[in-house]
Image (cartoon, rainbow, N blue to C red):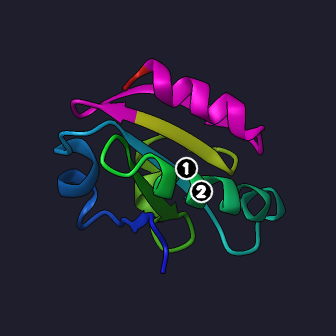
Amino acid sequence: MSAATMVTKDNFESEVLKSSLPVLVDFWAEWCGPCKMLLPIVEELAAELQGKVKVCKVNVDESQELAADYNVMSIPTLFIFKNGQMVDQIIGAVPRVKILDKLKAHM
């Protein structure tokens, strides 16, 4: 079972924008090689930071409108939201420490 929450246009506001915790949102797709490389890192961080950071995933194939709303041009793209605002972003498959450092800056 994934520690990350799958989000769509229907629950994005309640799960991400209204979250009391900072939220890491992973925009990904099934066919994306770099997304698959990032998957274990994102899952690991979701479990490790449970209660401190919420981790959500958006499948861009299933939620194209949401990806367009946030101008996601390439995947994987990770956004960090805090108090309903996007405060940081990471594009591409990056090392775990880079994601963790950016998350810690917003915790």
Instruction: Looking at the picture, tell me which residue is in the foreground, 33 or 24.
Output: 24
Q: CA distance from mark 2 to mark 1?
A: 4 Å
* Residue beneath the point at 62% across and 44% down: 77
Q: Check if mark 2's residue and mark 1's residue have beta carbons within 8 Å.
A: yes
Q: Residue at x 72, y 55 (%)?
A: 38
Residue positioned most to the bottom: 1
Q: Secondary structure at mark 2?
A: helix
Please name the amino acid that badge 2 sits on. Answer: Glu
- Span of residues in magenta: 81-105
Circle 1 sits in a helix, a strand or a loop, which is it? helix
Please identify the quadrant where the C terminus is shown. Answer: top left
Answer whether residue 85 is magenta in the image. yes
- Residue of label 2: 44
- Identify the residue shown where x is 55% and y is 30%: 89
**Residue 71: percent from left, percent from top:** 52, 40
The residue where tag 1 is placed is 45
Give, as a three-letter code, the residue at label 1.
Leu
